[in-house]
Amino acid sequence: MSIKLENISYTYQIGRPFEKLVLENISLEIRENTIVGIMGATSSGKTTLLQILAGLLTVQKGQVIIDNDIKVNTQNTFVNSVGLVFQFPEMQFILDRVFDEIAYSLTFLKLKQAEIKNRVLESMEIVGLPGAKYKDRRIENLSSGEKRRVAIATILALDRKYILLDEPTAALDYPGRQDLQKLILRLRDSNKTVVIVSHDLSYLLEMCDEIYIISKGRVAMVLSSDLRPEKLDSLKTLSHPLPAYMETAIKLKKKGFDLRLENWTEDALIEEIIATLVSGHLAD
Amino acid sequence: MISLRNVSYTYPHSNQAALVNITLDIAVGEFIAVVGKNASGKSTLARLLNGMLIPSSGLITVDGLKITDKQDLVKIRKKVGLLLPSPDNQIIFNLVEEDVAFGPGNLGLPTQEIRDRVDTALRMVSMEEFKKHPPYLLSGGQKQKVALAGLLAMNPEYLVLDEPTVMLDSQSKQSIIQNIIKINRNLKTTVIMITHDLEEVIHADRIVLLDEGTIKGILQPSDLSMNTEKLEKLGIEQIEVIKLIDKLKAKAQGKLQLSSNSLTVEELVEEICQLS
């Protein structure tokens, strides 16, 4: 099971003076039960891509295949399996209290009250906002991190299989980012698929199974566990700085340090740098 | 100089003060960073500096002008430019260049001077090619740059920037930060930058740590490595290179003679090379 995008192109303002092609022949696959990152420069087409995945924009060219079923231009079918949390979701809350906000979308599904209550409390539990403490809290009094979690809970309550997060860490502080990361990992553990659009490579590398790098409307590169120096070098030419541990290792190798650079995890690189330094650079 | 004396602020209908007893002097030409987690009072402080909010108690003066004096307040707002984090809330015109021209236009400047200022400001944020574009067709990051250009075109003496890079990619972030540093150093514009990201302010003169509405410390960038624990407690992420140095040292079990003074990868690599 997966979402597949095949040769998707999208143009804004077709036939008008500001016509702009933002996606050109994009093909990618988001496999079930994974965390997928989408990264790209400002205005590279990331948000457009998410809105196509969520069925908010009608596909102009190419096709979107969800769970092996071709679904082109049929917005209603998307809605059942994909949920999108927008950039700054706190700006789109419409009700005052946490429980009511999360329950709002469920009221359109003709569910019984008991079922709505169960779903809301369960989603609140998953995002780390226990019902007993938070259900009657006013949203305006929550921290930004807590508000993001309310927005994610609204999607969870709808029981979406694919959860799309557009810049979920924008303007979020360190504790909020850490909490969100734990939550995203928990979502994968509970059989959800999460797609994250972000500018932050370090943050994505810490949890994603695959990262698609979008540049000028195309998939410029796919990063998975096969990180290699040449791939990382081209990543830099796409103007995405590497995490400090990778950058340091690459620069040390260029300076003549004997580093193999086969395993790119932070722990492995630190270990390798230390091992290389042992002979000459460490005190007795 | 901007001077705050025992400044407190409580929002209407709130029981809890957003800022409590803030005393701080910001010298002309300084680059000050205000860092803290969400809801620490950073944005409230930014809004007080140009009189968008008036203190509940205490005194703020800008070059001797009192923020509580209505006539002084008009002058203060010409001196102190404030950039808000959400660009959609501050872009009002149909074309990028018209929006950037709005501020200088209101200063009653000659048309040519307004044009020059608009072009210079758009160049500073690398948006000159978009000057005839409608802002609603721009991405979030591009709008943020246009909003900053609108502020720069006013040539303010004090620049208060509330999370100016929050929606930008790494390259745009770097270029905006470099421009802010240039404006600070070359034009001697005082910069007060609000952020939760320490990486952006390693070039600041001073870093004010804010938490629960009070100042918990004022550091220089060179002090950062000695304050990891304190920053952690305040919910502020230590910069990547210092975290890496700490991990390298821990892994080497105290045998690695790194100074912890490096703030960038280049400095760290240089230091490691010098150990050989």
Image: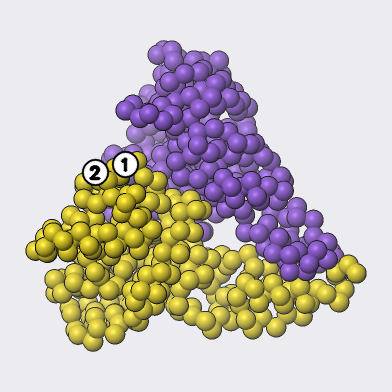
- Foreground residue, A26 or B129? A26
Which tint was used for chain A?
yellow
Q: Choose top left, top right, bottom left or bottom right for residue A81.
A: bottom left
Which tint was used for chain B?
purple
The percent coordinates of residue B98 (x first, y second) are 32, 39
Question: Which residue position is annotated with label 1?
Answer: A140
Q: Amino acid at mark 2?
A: Asp
Q: Is residue A8 left or right of residue B226?
A: left
| A177 relative to B96, above or below | below
Label 2 SS = loop
Asked whether disc 2 touches disc 1, contact meaning CB atoms under 8 Å apart, the reply is: yes
Quadrant that contains the C terminus of chain B: bottom right
Label 2 vs label 1: CA separation? Answer: 7 Å
- Foreground residue, B21 or B74? B21
Question: Which residue position is annotated with label 2?
Answer: A96
- Foreground residue, A275 or A256? A275
